Amino acid sequence: MGAVAVARLVSAGLNPVLTPAGFAEGQWGADDRNERGQIIYCAGHDEFSDRYPWAPQANDHERGLGACIDLIIEVSGMGTVEFVDLEALSLEETLRRVGYAEEASRSAELMGRPLAEALPALAAILQRMFEVRQ
């Protein structure tokens, strides 16, 4: 699966969930040496902290500096999900810390799965995390 195809697939699946949650549209970057790619979604730290004060990443930086909270999805050269982190904390750990044990377990099961298979479940998990807790 090429970088452009991965970027389009992730954008189509996650932009509708993450942009209303305050993140900019996903940006793609690739590491040709390791045949990995990342989609990065950025939310302004202060806005994120105001919208999601319950998140472990809230108020992680000094306010007013223009810092971002990044959601990173890394995809292997084989097209499998390698990790999903929210500001250097795995999505699984983030979900556990906010009391979503079932979603945390489901997110852990997505690692190593083909992106096309994992993406709908990932979108549903993120939708629940950012909608219900507002």
Image (cartoon, rainbow, N blue to C red):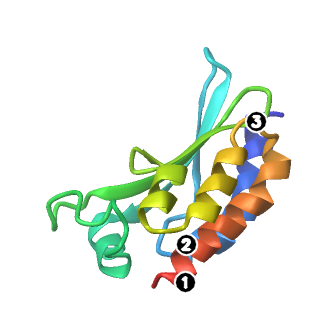
**The C terminus lies in quadrant:** bottom left
Q: Identify whether 66 is placed above or below 29.
A: below
Mark 3 and mark 1: span between their CA atoms? 28 Å
**Local crowd size for mark 3, using a 10 Å CA cut-off: few (<14), some (14–19), many (≥20):** many
N-terminal of the two: label 3 or label 1? 3
Residue furthest top as drawn = 33
Query: Quadrant of the rendered structure where residue 30 is?
Result: top right
In the rendered image, which residue does mark 3 sit on?
A: 80
51 left or right of 9? left
Distance (Cα) linking label 1 and label 2: 6 Å
Disc 1 and disc 2 in contact, CB within 8 angstroms: yes
Report if the CB atoms under discs 3 and 1 are less than 8 Å apart. Answer: no
Q: Position of residue 99 (x, y in %)?
A: 48, 68
Instruction: Give x and y (percent) for residue 104.
Output: 59, 57
Residue 37 position within the rendered picture, expressed as x and y whole percent measured from the top left: 63, 34
98 relative to 60, above or below: below
Rendering quarter of residue 52: bottom left
Residue 1 appears anywhere in the view: yes
Residue 26 at x, y = what percent?
58, 56
Q: Nearer the viewer, residue 19 or 134?
A: 134
Q: Report the Cα–Cα distance between label 2 and label 3.
A: 23 Å
Three-letter code, disc 3: Thr
What's the residue at 30%, 66% (across, down)?
Answer: 58
Residue identified by numbered label 2: 129
Mark 2: secondary structure: helix
Disc nearer the start of the sequence (2/3): 3
Q: Amino acid at mark 1?
A: Val
Residue 132: give its label.
Answer: 1
Circle 3 SS class: loop
Residue type for callout 2 = Met
Residue 12 visible from this viewpoint = no
